[in-house]
Amino acid sequence: MSEAAPESEPAPSLATTGLTKAFGGVTALDSATVTFHHGKVNALIGPNGSGKTTFFNCVTGMIRPDAGRTAYRGRDLTGRPPHRIARAGIGRSFQLCRVFPRMTVLDNLLAAVRPHGLAGQLARSGRREETERARDWLTRMGIEHLERAEAGRLSWGQQKLLELAGVLMSEPELILLDEPAGGVNPALVDRIGDLVRELNAEGRTFLIVEHNMDMVMSLSDHVVVFDRGRPIAQGPPQVIQSDERVLGAYLGI
Amino acid sequence: MRRGSDTRLIHLGALLAAAAIALSFPSMAPSPYEITVGIAILNYAVLSTSWNFVGGFTGYISLGHGAFAGLGAYGTGLLVARAGLPPFAALFTAAALVALIAVPVGYAALRVRGASFVIVSIALVLILLLVFQSWASFTGGSRGLVVPRPFPGMLRAEHHRTFYFLFLALLAVTLSAWWVIDRSRFGMGLKAIREDEDKAQSLGIPTYSYKLVVFVVSAAFTALAGGLYALWFGDLDPVFQFSVLGGAYMVLMALLGGVRHLYGPLLGAVAVGYALEYAKVEYGDTPLHLVVAGLLLGVVVMFMPDGVIPAATALIGRFRRSGETSIREVTAAELRERREQPNRTEVKDGERSGT
Ligand SMILES: Nc1ncnc2c1ncn2[C@@H]1O[C@H](COP(=O)(O)OP(=O)(O)O)[C@@H](O)[C@H]1O
Ligand SMILES: [Mg+2]
């Protein structure tokens, strides 16, 4: 592995050991052991079918790995159901952007509010404080004018921004984004990149799966490269760019 | 917001008018027979509104809710007839017991999504039908179970009037509960499940507990409707109490009226309930009403998948909104404007690092 020698080891964020998942005969994750850095923008890259989305699904509890463990900041999360993992501070987006299509844009965010106790559950949704918080996120994404629109009628790019706003509304520390730039126009790619940078500066950790190499190289502090379900290289973007195995396996040059 | 307060006034007016009609109906009815039709319709309305706690909020279509109505009815009847409990103590005890039974049932049934859930829910009804038919020494079997009248000295007409108001009160409570959940954060979580269950879970919503809680609430209200029916009707037969058809009617009524709307199931119950009673009087108990119900369900599902209320609202909205542009057009224009002024929002143009 081409590890850049770090002066001081960064604190671990999400970490897996021996994570394995097979679908029938296809090994999507092959004993993947990998650690991401807390407080940083981490990137996970690799060719199509190398197991990136499966990795997300396993660590967020959406599918059960065949073997291996997941920990977040030293706390074991293996086998927890998705909502518990979300409550541990890990939010995620989906590769094929998922919003609640028949809810309004504002309700999409209100649905991500986490009530406490019976009184909190039965309290009216959309109280002033949470509505204001939701509007702040919508404003930040630049879609505040759409708050009453049905989410399913938004354009693809707007839905991507809405999905990110919803994830942020649930107040995660670590945000997993599965191809945030997938299928969006170049202006919006820049915009999403800027948002990630800002949100990271405010203290959120990111793990981004992305095919857009300009975005990955300009945005990330730490890059992990997957090939056939396991990491083949990791390090700072400059090092990864010149790694032979990466060029061979992934960039296909 | 002007439009909002207008709508609220219209809603309030309609609600008061409907309440006034419902309350004065027994005194306007020409004979006790009309009151019994009113009771039948109110019973359907409570049942389909109860069903709609699950169907409307979570989108899980249960065809097995007849089981909870039947258990509520038999539970109440047996507690009165065999255990000697006072009628209304029996009613609430039975509903509580059904809620308890609904926990393991929901636990098993809600694990499976989509079509399997429907099948599991039907299976429950059929199993209970067999049990209550064959365990005749306790349940009365096919000979029926006679439930003693709760108000022994009361004349028939007065008995019907009294139960009309009891059913009306139960409907009011059921609708209020649905309304409270609808506007709550819990309700928002349930609706998120209806839209996309995985996504809801990834946002931290404990989807399984949410579904289970609302399933139990739904079962309890369904049982109350069944139990009140037992006290009113006074004679129970497993074939009618545990019928898949009964569950199907609840679904039909809710879908017809609109499952996303508080009054949808009520409206569907009035329409279908009236049609059913009318068919019974005009044509007797023929399978014809089944055909009609089936056709009606087909029409609704094909042409008004959201029910009559949303279809009508959309129609009215189309007339009202003639001048405004659609959401999509506004969006596209806004987006173009936004692209021309990249610094309009707080998003800074951060410096690129690396290459
Ligand atoms: N739900 C699934 N069922 C069956 N096979 C799957 C499923 N999800 C992923 N796979 C397979 O696992 C492999 C890894 O897929 P994926 O994790 O989506 O890769 P990536 O996101 O890196 O493109 C692929 O061969 C894919 O076909
Ligand atoms: Mg993928």
Image (cartoon, coloured by chain):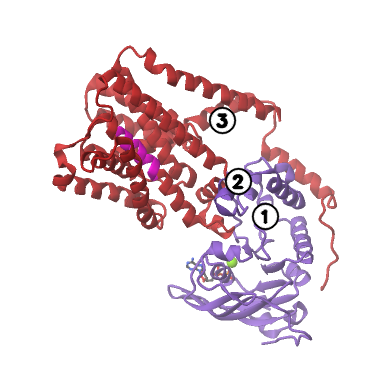
Could you say where residue A233 lies in the image, as x and y percent from the top left?
66, 82
In the depicted view, which residue is nearer to us: B194 or B352?
B194
- Mark 1, residue position: A169
Inter-mark Cα distance, 3 to 1? 31 Å
Secondary structure of the residue carrying numbered label 2: helix
Q: Is mark 1 within 8 Å of ligand 2?
A: no
Is residue B257 visible to the viewer in this orientation of the structure?
A: no
Query: Which quadrant is home to the C terminus of chain A?
Result: bottom right
Q: Which chain is purple?
A: A
- Amino acid type at mark 3: Ala
- Mark 2, residue position: A152
Badge 1: how crowded within 10 Å, few (<14), some, or many (20+)? many
Residue drawn at the location 34% of the way across and 24% of the way down: B162
- Mark 3, residue position: B314
Please indicate whether residue A237 sits to the left or right of residue A22 in the image.
right
Q: Are marks 2 and 3 in contact (CB under 8 Å)?
A: no
Q: Chain of mark 1?
A: A
Badge 3: how crowded within 10 Å, few (<14), some, or many (20+)? few
Q: Are marks 3 and 1 on the same chain?
A: no
Q: Give the prevailing secondary structure in the magenta stretch.
A: helix
